[in-house]
């Protein structure tokens, strides 16, 4: 039987005492766990830890750790997703699914055709945490506060690529290999439902940001984010 995994924001030793009320409620009322049940916990490092509840009470839990496993990332790419802000549910769907795939960070950006200007970052962090727990990840992605497209581009210290209809097909060997080369910090810029404005395309050209496309089909913003992330992180060169 597969064990439940939980993120905890504290150090993990041979014995872990937890007083987080939300976690305690989740363990007892949602998962119906009890003393002696086994779980897996992680705290954002390279390892996950398996153990059993020595104590599981209303106000505290104590987990005895008896196994530690290093979880290796099969793809050595730090992928940042610069996503134009779209409808709340759709942006949350992107965070959930792209965290499963292995995206390292989300940068909500305000573009000329963005449908909204703000997001609930606390809720997005909770969704990312739950997705990491479910998908076997040990590191939580970082979720930045929304900012303008221009500012986000200038502050990023990796290599930028933009998803656009007129770009080079991502499935081409040259483009795919360029994006999926391991050991790099890269970002994909994905526009809103209405696409990038002409002014924004001029900015991309002036900054020499290479563009790629997912073919002739028209995809929703959330679909494009998931597909492009999967092709880069999970696809074969």
Image (cartoon, rainbow, N blue to C red):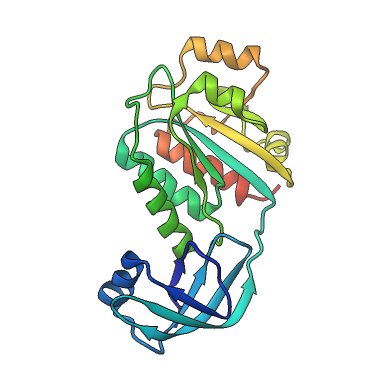
Q: Establish if 15 lies above or below 18.
A: below
Q: Residue at x 60, y 26 (%)?
A: 155
Residue 120, position in %: x, y?
33, 40
Q: Residue at x 43, y 52 (%)?
A: 128
Residue 38, position in %: x, y?
45, 83
Q: Establish if 4 lies above or below 123.
A: below
Asked where in the image residue 91 lies, by quadrant, the reply is top left
Q: Residue at x 34, y 47 (%)?
A: 123
Q: Residue at x 56, y 52 (%)?
A: 102
Tell me if 150 is positioned left or right of 172 in this view: left
Q: Establish if 87 lies above or below 149.
A: below
Tell me if 1 is positioned left or right of 209 in this view: left
Residue 120 visible at all: yes
Q: How many marks?
A: 0
Residue positioned most to the bottom: 36
Residue 114, position in %: x, y?
37, 23
Tell which of 41 and 134 is nearer to you. 41
Q: Establish if 132 lies above or below 16.
A: above
Quadrant (top left/top right/bottom left/bottom right) for the N terminus = bottom left
Residue positioned most to the left: 29
Tell which of 183 and 165 is nearer to you. 183
Asked where in the image residue 66 lies, by quadrant, the reply is bottom right
Residue 167 visible at all: no
Residue 96, position in %: x, y?
42, 51
């Amino acid at each position: 039987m597969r064990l439940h995994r939980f993120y905890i924001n504290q150090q993990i030793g041979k014995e872990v005492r937890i007083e987080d009320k939300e976690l305690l409620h989740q363990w007892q009322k949602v998962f119906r766990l009890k003393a002696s049940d086994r779980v897996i916990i992680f705290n954002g490092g390279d390892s996950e830890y398996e153990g059993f509840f020595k104590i599981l009470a209303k106000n505290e839990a104590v987990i005895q750790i008896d196994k530690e496993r290093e979880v290796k990332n099969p793809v050595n790419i730090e992928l940042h997703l610069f996503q134009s802000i779209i409808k709340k549910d759709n942006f949350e769907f992107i965070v959930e699914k792209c965290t499963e795939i292995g995206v390292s960070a989300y940068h909500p950006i305000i573009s000329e055709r963005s449908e909204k200007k703000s997001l609930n970052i606390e809720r997005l962090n909770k969704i990312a945490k739950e997705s990491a727990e479910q998908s076997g990840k040990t590191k939580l992605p970082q979720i930045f506060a929304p900012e303008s497209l221009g500012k986000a581009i200038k502050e990023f210290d990796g290599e930028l690529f933009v998803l656009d209809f007129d770009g080079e097909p991502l499935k081409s060997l040259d483009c795919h290999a360029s994006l999926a080369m391991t050991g790099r910090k890269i970002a994909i810029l994905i526009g809103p439902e209405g696409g990038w404005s002409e002014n924004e395309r001029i900015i991309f050209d002036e900054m020499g940001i290479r563009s790629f496309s997912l073919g002739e089909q028209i995809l929703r913003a959330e679909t494009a984010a998931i597909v492009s992330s999967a092709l880069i992180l999970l696809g074969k060169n």
